[in-house]
Image (cartoon, rainbow, N blue to C red):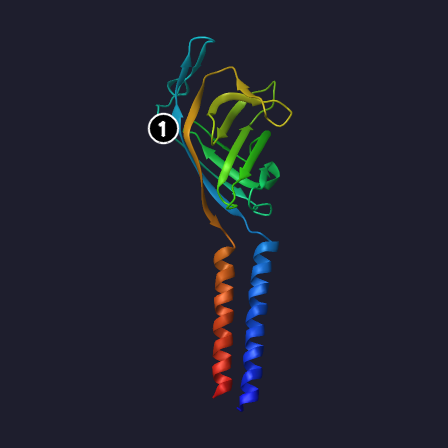
Amino acid sequence: MNKHDSKVMSRRSLAAIGALFAIVTMSADAGAAPVVYNYSGECTSFVLSQPPISQTCAGVGLSDGDPITGSITFDGTNFGPNASINANDIMSFSFDTGIFVIDHTTVSGLLVAGMLGADGMTFDDFRMSAADALAPESGNGLTISLFGTGRFGENMRCNIVGCNNLDGDDPMARISNQSLTRVSQLSEPGALSLLGIGLAALVAARRRRSR
């Protein structure tokens, strides 16, 4: 192989590598894959004499500090720096309060309001309310709020307009020490693997031709 042919092959190899990288990048961005976050919190009691409020873990059959766990899968399409997130961005969710499980297959009312930070991954704010029943009926209900107070109970209800008033007549408990932790974006390993395989194939092909 002469020097001219070698230069041409180098340019072609670089162009192919660039094209492969662009394809992988565009596929990851255009069809943003599901993003999974784990939720954790703790049952907390709250008692106030005036006005009288009693929301205790014992009232719902738990103890203070008992874990409240869950996971939320977002479709990832709207994820980015300082992006607003709502119920349309959620693909599925499930929460275990220790007395009931509530998930996307059972809820009748759902409200989600969140804001991602500058990194596009960490939530600067997130609130979610979900209930198995709409007023005047009642059922399992849960509110989580990363920078506020969560609460849950077995006889709660959402109003018809998006669950922004979640209340109940029977005992409920509060949730504290809440967090949402991102655990995966399902497409990233596949995209990186595809890029690595493509680069290895190009290098191997170039070595064969240069012999």
Q: Which residue is mark 1?
A: 66
Horizontal side of residue 60 vs 3, given as left or right? left
| Residue at position x 55%, y 29% in the image | 130
Identify residue type, mark 1.
Answer: Asp
Residue 73 visible in this rendered orientation of the protein: yes
Residue 66: give x, y in percent of width and height.
36, 28
Residue ranking furthest to the bottom: 2
Residue 105 visible in this rendered orientation of the protein: no
SS for dot 1? loop
- Foreground residue, 86 or 84? 84
Q: State the image quarter where residue 2 is shown.
A: bottom right
Residue 30: give x, y in percent of width and height.
61, 55
Total marks placed? 1
| Residue at position x 50%, y 71% in the image | 199
Tell me if mark 1 has few (under 14), some (14-19) or many (20+) residues whose alpha carbon lies within 10 angstroms of its own: some
Q: Is residue 130 above or below residue 8?
A: above
- Foreground residue, 160 or 82? 82
- Foreground residue, 23 or 165? 23
Residue ranking furthest to the right: 161
Residue 181: give x, y in percent of width and height.
44, 41
Residue 191: give x, y in percent of width and height.
52, 60
Q: State the image quarter where residue 135 is shown.
A: top right
Q: Is residue 59 above or below residue 20?
A: above
| Residue at position x 59%, y 36% in the image | 87
